[in-house]
Amino acid sequence: MNSQSPSLPRLAIVVPCYNESEVFSYCLTELGGYLGRMISDGMISPASYLLFVDDGSRDDTWRQISAATKSHAHVRGLKLSCNKGHQAALLTGLANADNADAIVSIDADLQDDINAIGEMVKSYVAGHDVVYGVRASRQTDTAFKRMTAEVFYRLMTMMGVKQVFNHADFRLLSSRARDALLEYHERNIYIRGLVPLVGFPSAEVYYDRRERTAGVSKYPLHKMMALALEGITSMTVMPLRIITLTGFIISAVAILAIVVVLINKMIGNPIQGWASVIVALFFMGGVQMLCLGIIGEYLGKIYLETKRRPRSHIEEKEGFGSP
Ligand code: UDP
Ligand code: MG
């Protein structure tokens, strides 16, 4: 059992927003309404709140958030100095969800079903520190997104990384699970890989993912690939081991080939042809470049980690005085 107080839990809902002016008012109405209903149903403390993190938006998202902090008692806003990416924005939000017993993170487009938040809170009250929102179906995702996600999850599992399948960043964390997560000081962040490492009792809540209500995805292909690469390089060194294994196998084959060539020469039957030599040369060149690239990727990450640069800078904070 987690160590929550016997009184109603104070819930914070953290929402990272990047150029979300088209969905913000919808998000505010829906989430604000849901929070209000949970408060009046006596599920959560009246001091619960929404925390919007503006991740350096270039549209008027911050202006809308700022206005909401003035017109709504349960709304807080944080403005990051520039775009730091979803994961960094989310962590900054988690770190600034002051005095909350439980913190739910959800995307601004509300593709994730807000009704699952009630289930998450019930699961938290029942003693779970981490409650994963899991997509029961991914019908609204494109076939490409479904396929790449499937391949990625399988790859990660093969490399020994524990992850909840079909779970993104829609989850509830108890304050102690949140504090534990914040103790991971790395700059290459892949939150959904770190949360299972935190441990504590966990549960899953299933929901159906919807279409984005408005606006376009803020995760274009290159950002998705960057996140996947971040996930692999920050969670496992298996690709480096695969390189070593490949090196062993190729060396063994090469030694065998040398023996075959020598024997053939000794028995007066030398192997002819430079084409095979060229092919082998190109093949080896390719493998070596690929291996160097993978090693370089890790080296680059180490370089960035050693700098220990801050994950984000907060430019403005609003609504933190209330409720
Ligand atoms: N987001 C962010 N910073 C970024 C990119 C995205 O804070 O650099 C937020 C975005 O506003 C949304 C969430 O991360 O709340 C997930 O983005 P999106 O819904 O566009 O991703 P998708 O559902 O298409 O994977
Ligand atoms: Mg989305």
Image: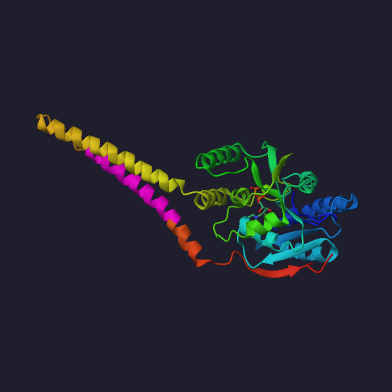
Q: Please give left or right for residue 267 compared with residue 236 in the image.
A: left
Coloring scheme of the render? rainbow
Looking at the image, can residue 18 be seen? no
User: Is residue 249 found left or right of 294 in the rendered image?
Assistant: left
Q: Position of residue 122 (x, y in %)?
A: 80, 45
* Residue shown at 22% from the left, 39% from the top: 277
Query: Hey, which residue is sitting farthest right in the picture?
Result: 40
Q: Is residue 199 left or right of residue 251?
A: right
Residue 97 to residue 280: above or below = below
Q: In which quarter of the image is residue 72?
A: bottom right
Instruction: Give percent across and percent down for residue 160.
Output: 52, 42
Q: Picture coordinates of residue 198 (x, y %)?
A: 63, 52
Q: Is the magenta stretch mostly helix, strand or loop?
A: helix
Q: Can residue 267 be seen in this view?
A: yes
Expressed as whole percent of the image width and height from the top left, the position of residue 22 reads: 73, 54
- Residue nearest the viewer, comparing 101 with 311: 101
Asked if the stretch drawn in magenta spans residue 317, the answer is: no
Tally of marks: 0
Give, as a single range, the part of the protein colored magenta.
275-298
Q: In this view, does 262 lie above or below 125?
A: above
- Is residue 291 in the magenta section? yes
Location of residue 296 (image quadrant): bottom left
274 is higher (above) or lower (below) than 189: above
Q: Residue at x 44, y 54 (%)?
A: 297
Quadrant where the C terminus sits is bottom right
